[in-house]
Image: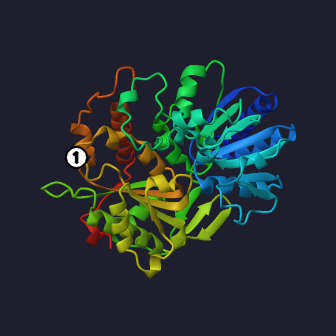
Amino acid sequence: MRPRGTFRRQIDVKVATVTDRLIRHVVDEERLAVVQAPPGSGKTHLLLRAAKEAYRARQRVSVATQTRSQADDICRRFSEAGVPAIRFVAHGDTGAEQPPGIDAIARHQDLPHGPCIAVGTTAKWGLIELADPFDVLFVEEAWQMAWADFMLLGQVAGRFVLIGDPGQIAPVVSIDASRWETAPRAPHRPAPELVLSEHRKSALDLSLPATRRLPACTAGLIRPFYDFPFDAWAEPGERLLVPLRRVAGVRGAVIERLGRSSVVGVTLPTPEGGPPLECDSEVAATAVGIARGILESQPDWVMGQARRRLRPPDIGLCATHHVMNAEMALHLDRRLDGINIDTPERWQGLQRKVMIIVHPLSGVVQPSAFDLETGRLCVMASRHEIALVVVTRNHLPETLDSHMPAAEQAVGRPDVSGRGHHQNTVFWGALVERDQVVEARGPESVG
């Protein structure tokens, strides 16, 4: 058995190597870098480090994010590090309060011509035309950006660093993109995917070696969603829920299994006529009942040397449909104030100590390519730091066993349905093999 902490030090050395290679690449003014990162691996920290070193090397640095909140968060973190930066905002937002050392600028004509760091959304950068391009553009959460949006950023800088999580939800496209499926540069595909397919030999291709957010056993569970290896920074058994009170029934069985592994599945019987579609009140009540039971056990959460009492704001609930999230919200009471409920799209970038999710295939008996695409499941299964509970109707394994995914993809495109079917099967099969699935009779057995 390896000495405790040895593996962590090895990971830290690998992270330092990746960081040094990226900084050297940017400072030496190399043209293109792509960094793949598992969930919670410190990719934003890596971006901040590299951008700061480029600024110290007297470069004009631009940063593109996919949302305003991501841009605000990066500016806040620059401020906390004592690095001056510019929040490139929409017109009319210049009056918003900024952190110390952060200036708000709306007009591109007012951006400095000398060394600086400017942070804005992809949409903001794509709507302007710069007479004086920046030296380098960093793209945060790059796998959420479509190639068409990346093309609009070509005039921002001549050098690019794309950093993101390839297991996350693909870019949202509001129009029918089937006509471009066989195009060499399909405008709706994630930008880093096309960059690596065309420029892998010339681009610096890096990956972060570990997730800092997830427990060790969860890292192994979601690794099949990715095309590159990674480990967990946390040691096995280092992150726990320690209940102070016993809870009976299904909730007690869930808590007991969370004491030996970070992920537990809970199944409800499927009605003879088939499961409810989209809105399943019993599944919603079960998910909330599990949250209530965990809190009633008065657990402490333990992460290394840190130990605190678990509170409602430490718990998150997630389902893929708004109607299911609304149904779960109906079952909350005052004792559960602070629990956040939202879709996987809104959970991207966030985390909680405990997550309780409704499996995307619960209630789906004829999975489509959309259902089998595992980006949403990957997001839902990677938001927790301590524990994850997956709630579903018990038809799930039978549906996966009996369903033969059709190869409907365009010629030359990956078999998303087949891969998604395999990933879903491996994910649930791992829980069954570990004896981490609890059978509930119904929501009344959960409470």
Q: Position of residue 21 (x, y in %)?
A: 75, 31
**On the rendered structure, is 335 left or right of 370?**
right
Above or below for 347 versus 15: below
Q: Position of residue 90 (x, y in %)?
A: 64, 55
At 50% from the left and 61% from the top, the residue drawn is: 354
At 58% from the left and 32% from the top, the residue drawn is: 151
State whether residue 42 appears in this view. Answer: no
Above or below for 53 versus 182: below
Q: Residue furthest left?
A: 273
Residue situated in front as seen by the camera: 234 or 321:
321
Q: Which residue is mark 1?
A: 365
Q: Quadrant of residue 196?
A: top right
Q: Residue furthest top?
A: 201
Residue situated in front as seen by the camera: 12 or 273:
273
Q: Position of residue 104 (x, y in %)?
A: 74, 57
Q: Position of residue 416 (x, y in %)?
A: 37, 32
Q: Quadrant of residue 7?
A: top right
**On the rendered structure, is 173 left or right of 90?**
left
Above or below for 346 versus 201: below
What is the quadrant of the N terminus in the image? top right
Three-letter code, disc 1 = Val
At label 1, counting other C-alpha atoms closer than 10 Å, the crowd grade (few under 14, some 14-19, many 20 or more) is some
Residue situated in front as seen by the camera: 404 or 26:
26
**On the rendered structure, is 28 left or right of 88?**
right
